[in-house]
Image (cartoon, helix red, strand yellow):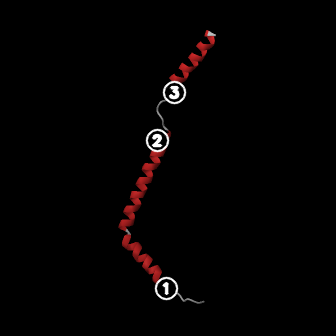
Amino acid sequence: MTERLSLIFDEAVRRIVTLNFKREEGQGVTEYGVVLAFVAVALAVVLAVLKTQISNFITRVGNDLSALPTTL
């Protein structure tokens, strides 16, 4: 009986010693979050810089569409 308990204890100690307490599962999620935040900020900056060009383009497309004949 003591030999069996000794084996169980030894196995438990071995598992505790080999545990890696540094959790790296959340690291990937955090990195994706940082990249997503960077992309969102970059997109906001690009839209702010190109706001007038985008607006002019949409206006031109709308004018061209309204100039099309209504019937074929």
Q: Residue at x 43, y 76 (%)?
A: 57
Quadrant housing residue 59: bottom left
Q: As drawn, is 58 to the left or to the right of 9?
A: left
Question: Callout 1: helix, strand or loop?
Answer: helix
Can you say whether 54 is above or below 26 in the image?
Answer: below
User: Can you identify the residue that label 2 sits on?
Assistant: 27
Q: Amino acid at mark 3?
A: Leu
Viewport quadrant of the C terminus: bottom right
- Report how far apart the C-alphas of labels 3 and 2 lie in the structure: 18 Å
Disc ID at residue 19: 3
Q: Amino acid at mark 2?
A: Gln
Q: Residue at x 58, y 90 (%)?
A: 71
Q: Residue at x 39, y 57 (%)?
A: 41
Mark 3 or 2 closer to N-term?
3
User: Can you identify the residue that label 1 sits on?
Assistant: 66
Q: Residues within 10 Å of mark 1 (few under 14, many from 20)?
A: few
Can you say whether 5 is above or below 51 in the image?
Answer: above
Q: As drawn, is 18 to the left or to the right of 37?
A: right
Q: Whole-percent x and y of residue 60? A: 44, 80
Disc ID at residue 53: none
Q: Residues within 10 Å of mark 2 (few under 14, many from 20)?
A: few
Q: Whole-percent x and y of residue 23? A: 48, 35
Can you say whether 58 is above or below 67 in the image?
Answer: above
Question: Callout 3: helix, strand or loop?
Answer: loop
Q: Residue at x 41, y 54 (%)?
A: 38
Q: Nearer the viewer, residue 31 or 1?
A: 1
Mark 1 or 3 closer to N-term?
3
Q: Amino acid at mark 1?
A: Ser
Question: Callout 2: helix, strand or loop?
Answer: helix
- Report how far apart the C-alphas of labels 2 and 1 lie in the structure: 52 Å
